[in-house]
Image (cartoon, grey):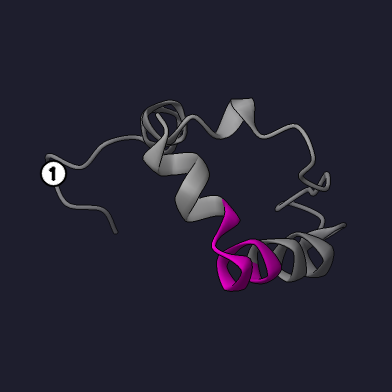
Amino acid sequence: MDLPDSLSSVKVSQMMGLENIKSKPASNALTGEGLKEGVDWLQGMLSDGCLILMLALL
């Protein structure tokens, strides 16, 4: 459960500029399709420092 004053997932995504990341794999949280690939991609981006650099440039 979110806190009463928390931001929506859409707002957080917009603030982080996630729509600008074009190389991310497609996934569907409702069906689970692509989630493992997405987590693997995110882990790789974090370990390489790429995602942190991209977010710092926003």
Name the residue at 76% across, 45% down: 24
In the displayed structure, does residue 8 sit left or right of residue 2? Answer: right
User: Which residues are drawn in magenta?
Assistant: 43-50
Please tell me whether residue 52 is drawn above or below residue 12 in the rendered image. Answer: below
Classify residue 32 by image quadrant: bottom right
Q: Does residue 6 show up magenta in the picture?
A: no
Q: Amino acid at mark 1?
A: Pro
Which residue sits at x=80%, y=70%? 36
Image quarter in which the N terminus is found: bottom left
Between 12 and 6, the residue placed more toward the observer is 12
Within-10-Å neighbours for mark 1: few <14, some 14–19, many 20+: few
Q: Which residue appears at 82% of the width and 48% of the height?
A: 25
Asked which secondary structure carries label 1, the reply is: loop
Q: Quadrant of the C terminus?
A: top left
Q: Main secondary structure of the magenta part?
A: helix
Place of residue 27 in the rendered image (x, y in percent of width and height, measured from the top left):
80, 49
For disc 1, the marked residue is 4
Residue at x-position 87% and y-position 57%: 33
Is residue 30 left or right of 58 when viewed as pictured? right
Of all residues, the one furthest to the left in this rendering is 5
Q: In this rendering, would 23 be left or right of 4?
A: right
Where residue 39 appears, as percent x and y from the top left, is 70, 67
Between 31 and 15, the one lying in front of the other is 15
Q: Position of residue 43 (x, y in %)?
A: 64, 71
